[in-house]
Amino acid sequence: ETGVTQSPTHLIKTRGQQVTLRCSSQSGHNTVSWYQQALGQGPQFIFQYYREEENGRGNFPPRFSGLQFPNYSSELNVNALELDDSALYLCASSVGWPSGRGYTQYFGPGTRLTVL
Amino acid sequence: DAKTTQPNSMESNEEEPVHLPCNHSTISGTDYIHWYRQLPSQGPEYVIHGLTSNVNNRMASLAIAEDRKSSTLILHRATLRDAAVYYCIGNTDKLIFGTGTRLQVFP
C-alpha cells in the first residue's frame, strides 16, 4: 500500500509568483486536506476536498485554491506569493469525512516552500 | 471548533511511562479526541483517537475523563524515537492543531 506522496520536496519562488503543489492520496482514500505549517507552529488547516468538491476551508485568502481529481489526487495553487507564504505545506488523506468522526488522516512528508 | 490546551514541553527518561495531558473543555458530545505526533522533519503521524471510552493500541493508550473535558495520552515505555511534538485535537470536520507538547526523551 502506497502512502501519501507530495511533490516537489522543496521549492523556491519569488514574491508575486504562482506555485502549484501536488499530492497523491493513499490508495482507497477519497478525502484530501491541505495544511500550512510555519516554522515552530502547528499545522493550519487550509481546505479539504471530498470526492472532488471543496467541503471546508480555513482562514486563508482566495489566492489559495485547490483541485481534486477523479483519482483523488490533489493540487494546491497559491497565486501572488507573499513572503509569509514560506512554510511547509502538508497534504493528508483519509478514507472518509468528516475527520472528527474518527476517520484517521494520513499525512505526506510535505513540500517546503520558500518565498524570496 | 473545540479549543485544546496542552503544556508546551515535557521531559522523560527512556523506558519510563509518559503521561501527556490535554484540556478540551469546549468539545462537543460527538467530536472524537485525536492525538497526532510529528517527528522532526516529517509530517504528522496518527497516534490514537477515542470518543468516550479509554482506548489502547500498539503505540499508546488514551484515557478520557468521564466529563470528556480532558484526556491523557499515555506512552507506556518512552523510547528515544518517541521524541516529537504531540498534538491533541478535538473537533468535527477538520483537524485544528494547536502548538502541541514537545516531548524530550533522555537516555
Image (cartoon, coloured by chain):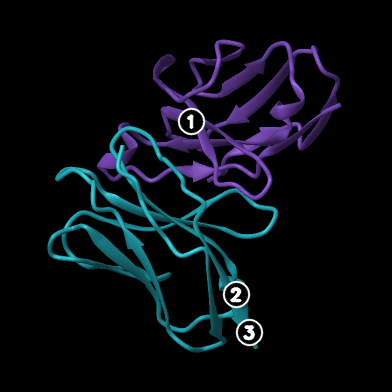
C-alpha span from label 2 to label 1: 29 Å
Mark 1 crowd level (few <14, some 14–19, many ≥20, 10 Å Cα): many
Nearer the camera: disc 3 or disc 1 = 3
In this structure image, what is the colour of chain B?
Answer: cyan
Q: Which residue is mark 2?
A: B104
State the SS at label 1. strand
Chain on which label 2 sits = B
- Measured as percent of width and height from the top left, residue A69 is found at 52, 15
Task: Answer with left or right where residue B31 lies relative to residue A64.
Answer: left
User: Which of these two is toward me, A4 or B32?
Assistant: B32
Q: Nearer the viewer, residue B25 or A18?
A: B25
Left or right: B30 as drawn, with respect to B16: left
Marker count (numbered): 3
Chain assigned purple: A
Between the residue at mark 3 and the residue at mark 1, the CA separation in whole angstroms equals 35 Å
Where residue B91 sits in the image (x, y, percent)?
30, 41
Category of crowding for the residue at label 2, using alpha-carbon neighbours closer than 10 angstroms: few (below 14), some (14–19), many (at least 20): some
Q: Residue at x 60, y 48 (%)?
A: B43
Q: Position of residue B53 (x, y in %)?
A: 17, 63
Q: Amino acid at mark 3?
A: Phe
Q: Can you tell which mark lies on residue A17? A: none
Q: Chain ID for label 3?
A: B
Residue identified by numbered label 3: B106
Q: What amino acid type should be assigned to the residue bearing mark 2? A: Gln
Q: Marks 2 and 3: CB-CB under 8 Å? A: yes
Residue drawn at point x = 49 percent, y = 44 percent: A106
Picture coordinates of residue A16 (x, y %)? 79, 12
Q: Which residue is mark 1?
A: A33
User: Could you say which is closer to the camera, residue B64 or residue A1?
Assistant: B64
Whole-number angstrom distance, CA of label 2 to CA of label 3: 7 Å
